[in-house]
Amino acid sequence: MPHPEKTHADLLIVHGDVFTMAGTGSGYIEDGAVAISGNSIVDTGPSGSLRARYTAARVVDASECAVLPGLVDAHVHSGIALLRGVAQDSPSWLASLAPFVNAMSLDALQAGTMLTVMEGIRAGTTTFCDNSPGIAHSLPFYEKSGARVAASPLTSDAMPAGGPPNARLPEFSGEMRAFGLLETRDLIDRWNGAAEGRIAVQLGPRAADFCSEELLIEIRRLSEKHGLKVHMHLAQDKRETEQVWRRYGVRPVGLLERMGLLNERLIAAHLIRCTPEEVERVARSGASMAFCPSSLLICDGILPPADIFMDAGGTVGLGTDETSSNNGANLWSEMKAGCLGLKMKRADAAYMPAWKALRMATTDGARAIGLGHEIGTIEAGKKADIILIDLTRPSLVPVMRRPVRNIIPNLVLSARGGEICLSIINGSIVYENGHMTRFDEGEAMGFISKAAEEICRGAGREAAETRTAPFVMTENGEY
């Protein structure tokens, strides 16, 4: 009998420990394989079965590798990545950051995005839900790098007021509002669906205290008109809660509810100043939560209420926030911090098992940012965003499959990020064996270093005048 003709694929990954993350668990396939054509996954299953059915332009031997969906960073401000480490150990993170923020240029914002994308991809992140100022200036690099991004501008019409939370309320500027909405509409027209569908545009009002009712109404209208997610901070600090109460007579969650923004299109970051009842209201509205454990622990000494949100049935994605707060664009660090933090909070070693933390960074993260129909699992029909992790690295050894499979616990609690050996985004290899494939890293690092030097020169005088905590620690030789 003649042999059946094989189907041709562009990439065939074989002999891996494949974790599809489909269904309700990890979707494990031992000695598994994945077939990719164009930008999509066309088949998964045992290696023997797929080798019998497919030929491929390239076959990737994933022996001794874990094969996972690419990681999804559900909340990141890539633009301020060059401020890593300048405001830590401070009673006021924002005050310590201010001299450096004030010294930034558009080039510095672009350099921050370049640094975040390089660090993130090297650690397995393939999708960045990026809420950054000047994001339009950085999208050409996202296009060039091959990364996937859900991009939103950090939009505000509040004029700087300064002072403590009980000081004069900031005034809102119609000019700032018009400019912010113009930027947002231009992003939608120019970039939504660009780069073979890798770039999606979302709406990014900064927070309830930074946005007028008029701006929030326009954000809601744009969201409804274009079906876009609204990515914003919610109840992120005392100032927000105090100012919203003084201005509107409600707390931030109540204001979003009043404005028609508390629904399934909302991605709510942090929620650290919510009451438990408010967290449950947000979860039950259909909104998702961006959980950034390291950032909030470092800046405020607070663990966000992801446990309450999940227990109420809400979808939680994992975010790095920004390197200026958590010091890294590495989702493995966030998985471990979130896992251990929630266990400690609940005083329950069984709470937040490693496989749930991994889902938070893959399939749940994709759902949280509105891309669950495209990414987050390794299944036929999904976009081919896949990473391979070297299981022979010392941090992940030994590998056991029976009687207990230890691969996921070791990934979540032991991986450093440097174990990634191959990253595929939209069907294209963007990182392999320690090297980016779509741009010159040396050239990028030169641009980043130059931008960082300019920030240091520009921030020096203000840092000395305000004598921020990190400045004083540097002066005292403690740093």
Image (cartoon, rainbow, N blue to C red):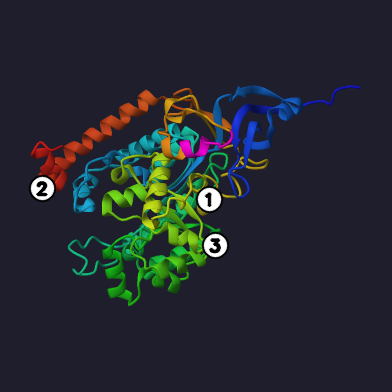
Q: How far apart are marks 1 and 2 (CA)?
A: 42 Å
- Indicate the amino acid at tag 2: Arg
Q: Where is residue 42 in the image (x, y as percent from the top left)?
A: 69, 36
On the question of residue 422 being in view, the answer is no
Q: Position of residue 149 (x, y in %)?
A: 48, 44
Give the camera-side residue of 103 and 263: 263
Residue displayed at 32% across by 30% down: 447
- Spot the residue most to the bottom: 249
Q: In this view, does 3 lie above or below 118?
A: above
Please identify the quarter of the rendering in which residue 18 is found: top right
Q: Distance between the residues labelled 3 and 2?
A: 47 Å
Read off the residue under disc 3.
Answer: 225
Q: Where is residue 146 in the image (x, y as percent from the top left)?
A: 50, 34
Residue 33, disc? none
Give the camera-side residue of 26 and 274: 26
- Indicate the amino acid at tag 1: Asp
Q: Quadrant of the N terminus?
A: top right
- Indicate the amino acid at tag 3: Lys
Give the camera-side residue of 175 and 235: 235
Which comes sooner in the sequence, label 1 or label 2? 1
The magenta region covers 402-410
Residue displayed at 49% across by 50% down: 201
Residue 467, disc? 2
Read off the residue under disc 1.
Answer: 364
Left or right of residue 352: residue 10 = right
Query: Dot 3, how many residues are within 10 Å of its Cα: few (below 14), some (14-19), or many (20+)?
Result: few
Q: What element carries label 1?
A: helix
Q: Is mark 2 on a helix, strand or loop?
A: loop
